[in-house]
Image (tube, helix red, strand yellow):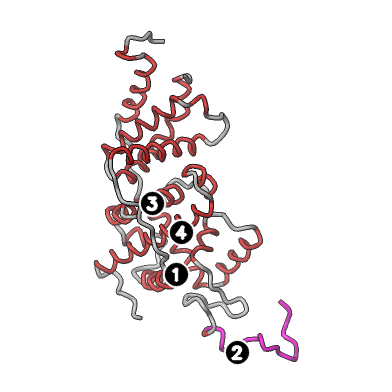
Amino acid sequence: MTEPSDHPTESDPPPGFEADAVANPFCMGAPPLRCNPSLDELYRYMDGFLDEGREAEVRNRLADCRGCGEIYDLQTQFRRLIEQRCQTELPPNLKDKVFGAIAEIELGPGGRGHRR
Amino acid sequence: MADRATFVEDTEPFMGSLYSTAVRLTGNRTDAEDLVQETYLRAYRSYDSFTAGTNLRAWLFRILNNTHINRYRARTRRPEEAELDDIEDLYLYRRLQDTSRYGRSAEDQLMEVFSEAEVVAAVEGLPEAYRMAVLLADVEGFSYKEIAEILDIPVGTVMSRLHRGRKALQKELYEFAEARGLVSAPAE
């Protein structure tokens, strides 16, 4: 961004105004870079579904804005929480059971087929 | 019929994640075992139609999902699947603010807040379509495009289900935390 000229434009935020001007209660960014990232967009970012240009913008935003960064960190933590708490260990006999059932198909009804 | 030894060798590494997903889908281990077994039997029968070099894991999950839907429809009649309403981002932001104040700012503070039983209850409480999207993305790490293929729905629908599902899950977990007095309800 270029340095402000001697003639400030209307879009320049007055000093001290930045913190109040944010749309997102977490965001500490200043206009015009103030952010209002929707969770949907953060999810698309997290899931690698943004185009390169937008991805870079969001990445910078997350690096620059502590508020947005916190939201994002918590979203990634949530994702890890779900991932780790939703694992169920495979019962030890299930593989034998499943592949045994498949072997039976091959042997035919009553298991009278020829073993290879 | 496909060569059994090849089929076993190729598909065996995925049984663990298929089983985990089956448990969350059916809500119990016995049905999950049956679902996994039927998935593998179907996969074996149609293994010749699987194109080598394409995504075998996604193919197996697609069969798991279809098998589950067929079994489920055959067994029970249930009213139309519930739709999740949009949850306002602001609602979640407020709770995030509250949660982030809870305890230390440790890497995995949420792990300490929520027990496995709570997370499982929240996940299993999601309507099935949303639950499957969340499981495929957040537990199995599939991309939007892969999930679209597994569930046979457009990518836009994947996003909508996944995002709404995640938000509903978080709302539910915040409510658990509130009920336990870990966080206070945000002031309006």
Callout 4: chain: B
Q: Residue at x 35, y 34 (%)?
A: B36
Amino acid carrying label 4: it is: His
Residue interval drawn in magenta: A1-19
Q: Quadrant of residue B15?
A: top left
Label 4 element class? helix
Q: Are marks 1 and 3 in contact (CB under 8 Å)?
A: no
In 3D space, how far apart are the residues under numbered discs 2 and 1 (Cα atoms)?
Answer: 29 Å
In 3D space, how far apart are the residues under numbered discs 2 and 3 (Cα atoms)?
Answer: 47 Å
Determine whether, in the image, residue A49 is placed left or right of residue B125.
right
From the image, tell me which residue sits under label 4.
Answer: B163
Q: Are marks 1 and 4 in contact (CB under 8 Å)?
A: no
From the image, tell me which residue sits under label 3.
Answer: B131
Q: Position of residue B161 (x, y in %)?
A: 45, 55
In 3D space, how far apart are the residues under numbered discs 1 and 3 (Cα atoms)?
Answer: 20 Å
Callout 3: chain: B
Q: Are marks 4 and 3 in contact (CB under 8 Å)?
A: no
Label 2 element class? loop
Question: Callout 3 environment at 10 Å: few (<14), some (14 to 19), or many (20+)?
Answer: many
Q: Position of residue A48 (x, y in %)?
A: 56, 54
Q: Residue at x 35, y 41 (%)?
A: B22
Quadrant the C terminus of chain B occupies: bottom left
Callout 2: chain: A
Task: Give a yes or no on whether discs 4 and 3 share a subunit.
Answer: yes
In 3D space, how far apart are the residues under numbered discs 1 and 4 (Cα atoms)?
Answer: 11 Å
Amino acid carrying label 1: it is: Asp
> Which of the marked residues, 1 or 4, is nearer the chain's N terminus?
1
